[in-house]
Image: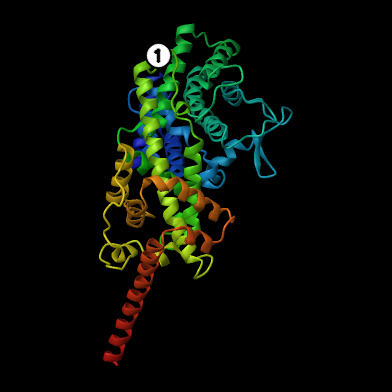
Amino acid sequence: MELFGEQKRCLDGLVESIEQLGGRVEIGKLEQIAELIIQTMRGPWRYFHTSEHIFEVGGSVDAIEVLAALFHDLVYVQVDQGVSFNISSALCPFVKEVRSQLVIRDETELPNDVMYHLVACVFGFVPGKTLSPFAGQNEFLSAVIAAKSLEPFLPASAIAEIAACIEATIPFRAVSPSGLSAIELLHQRLVSVNRDFDFGWTDAKTAEIVKRSVRLANRDVENFASPNSSNFLDNTWNLMPETNHELSNVNSYTVAGYRKSLQKMEGFLNFLKPELVFQQFLQEPDDETYANMIAQTRKNIAVAKLYLGIKLITIAILEALSYRLGRDIPLSTMMGELRAPGFKTSVLEDYLPNRQIAYPLESQLEKEVLDILAIGRNQESPYDIKNSPVATFIIKSIGFAETENFLKKAQDFFAGDISSEEFLSYCAPDIIETISSGVMKLFDSRKMALGKVKLAHQTVS
């Protein structure tokens, strides 16, 4: 079978890496694995965790890193709404579903499988454990598939190193009650794995395995430390539809559906501590590099939180206005459809004035956020425009100093603590009047467009 594109790139990565590690290459079987990986990464809701992502994370230098990256996102239950049919059969001997949660089988049910036992020891997971999507479930199951897939081609010690890399990609873990970081706990478990499986690793070798795991894990989240905040927001916008599947229905998702996706992301970023994004072990990376990564992450999160806060204020106004029409109004009804090539449809921004900034900007953060709102993120996304003309109009009108109080009122409205009309009464009347007038003009433009069709029909008749 001749492979092309992503599958060929995946197969080449498998073959070259296994050869570098002195393993056995069987092209036919590796072609099947490449097809399995790429098919899974092309799932309908994968916008960020795609095949391009696994190639970027793996790099091209270290064979263990390449192999770990190819498998590390294979299972993503929240995104795929379950486990892909093509890979579920490989996991059934080891996990079962109990009340909609995945649970590791009891000791009496588990088969005597060396590869499974090895991965469980690397992760520190025990029989009967309930798996959590936010505490290593996806990474653990991905590592089990990696181990079972690569078992015919590589020694167990190499597979343990691959599993360690995948374990390190479990994100955003706080320091344990014992005061050890997640990566330090991984090191402890690898010392035990080396002893129990008699791999013969030296202390220096074990430390290098952990350092490599840190390199891969940090590459997996490197967009958090992007020197350009707009690039970070591009990735954020790619992540949103993965767990908010309504957004994949372009031009038909509701105002509330879009708002909920913004709320989820804003809530996550408010909870996230920059210190938990990247990992460090024995000067990998060195202190200066690590400090710079944390500082850039803190800056990017600050930009994203302010940006999302303003987007939430904007969507709150549009949602409150939409309640005058109904409860499940598509966002495109209020703002116009996303413009497609060759079609010139009216959109809400056509009817908004180009307002000057009413209040002077007080920080570089405010300037950067206003630029991203007005000019746009770097990339268009399939479900949203990259700039934010309505949000730009609002923030130029109310100023950044008001955003915190305004956002609290918006959140009261979202929670049902105040009505839509109470929320609108809190907003400056001229802003509400301008936006509602713009929506009405948008409706009028549709009415006129339909009238032209009617007129043309009468002429033909």
Residue 16 placed where, x, y %?
35, 26
- Seen in the picture, residue 8 relative to 448 is either above or below; the reply is above
Residue 354 placed where, x, y %?
26, 59
Tally of numbered tags? 1
- Seen in the picture, residue 434 relative to 406 is either above or below; the reply is below
Residue 401 placed where, x, y %?
39, 45
Residue 266 placed where, x, y %?
47, 43
Q: In this orientation, does residue 237 appear?
A: no
Residue in view at x 30 percent, y 41 percent: 368
Q: 77 and 135: which one is in front?
A: 135
Viewed as shown, does residue 49 lie left or right of 348? right
Viewed as shown, does residue 408 lie left or right of 4? right
Residue in view at x 55 percent, y 22 percent: 175
Q: How is the image coloured?
A: rainbow
Residue in view at x 46 percent, y 50 percent: 406
The quadrant in which residue 227 appears is top left
Q: 401 and 219: which one is in front?
A: 401
Quarter the C terminus occupies: bottom left
Furthest residue in direction bottom, as rendered: 461
Furthest residue in direction right, as rendered: 108
- Seen in the picture, residue 100 relative to 256 is either above or below; the reply is above
Q: In this orientation, does residue 141 appear?
A: yes
Quarter the N terminus occupies: top left
Which residue type does callout 1 highlight? Gln
Q: 48 and 310: which one is in front?
A: 310
Residue in view at x 38 percent, y 21 percent: 290
Crowd band around label 1 with a 10 angstrom C-alpha radius: few (<14), some (14–19), many (20+): few
Q: 97 and 27: which one is in front?
A: 97
Q: What residue sits right under mark 1 in the picture?
A: 283
